[in-house]
Amino acid sequence: MIEISKNGNQFVVKPGADVVASMVNEFRSQLHELVQKSPKILVIDLSGVKMVDSVGIGVIIATHNSLNKIDGELRVTNVADDIFTLFSTMRLDHHFTIEKKE
């Protein structure tokens, strides 16, 4: 279940499950709705997420691109080591903030 919270002009989205093709339609829809609200910062909190597939990565990149157009910022937090390595290898950390799980 996707959990969304707001703190000022910052939204935090917790997918609550692996970001893979089978769940990505709802995730994409929720992120799109949030981008329409023009947040200054959108945080995707990957607590409890053990896997992100290519479809999930595509949704995250599309969200970053949409936020970029409205001068918003994407942050991906609580990223598991394997996912962090994947994002770094893809050089996504050069486009938006990626923080490892504490």
Image (cartoon, rainbow, N blue to C red):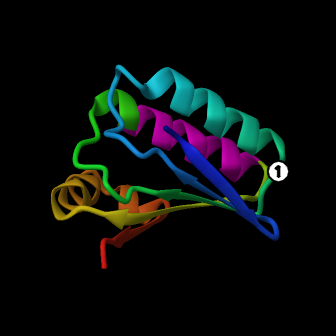
Give the extent of the magenta segment: 57-69
**Magenta stretch: dominant secondary structure:** helix
Which x, y percent locates residue 100?
31, 72
Q: Which residue is rendered at x = 76% and y = 63% of the image?
A: 40
Packing grade of label 1 (10 A; few <14, some 14-19, many >=20) is some
Q: Relative to 87, does residue 18 appear above or below in the rendering?
A: above
Q: Which residue is rendered at x = 49% and y = 38% of the image?
A: 1
Q: Relative to 94, does residue 65 appear above or below in the rendering?
A: above
Dot 1 amino acid type: Ser
Q: Relative to 30, does residue 100 appear above or below in the rendering?
A: below
Residue 74 relative to residue 46: left or right? right
Taking the view exactly as shown, the residue that stands out farthest to the front is 1
> Quick one: 87 or 82, which is closer to the camera?
82
Residue 38 relative to residue 97: left or right? right
**Quadrant in the picture for residue 55:** top left
> Quick one: 65 or 16, which is closer to the camera?
16
Asked if residue 63 is among those painted magenta in the image, a careful observer would answer: yes
Q: How many marks?
A: 1
> Quick one: 51 or 71, which is closer to the camera?
51
Q: Quadrant of the C terminus?
A: bottom left
Residue 99 relative to residue 3: left or right? left
**What element does badge 1 sit on?**
loop
Q: According to the image, label 1 marks what residue?
A: 38
Q: Which residue is rendered at x = 64% and y = 35% of the image?
A: 30
Which x, y percent locates residue 24?
45, 27
**Quadrant in the picture for residue 18:** top left
Asked if residue 39 is among those painted magenta in the image, a careful observer would answer: no
Which x, y percent locates residue 101?
30, 72
Q: Which residue is rendered at x = 23% and y = 54% of the image?
A: 83
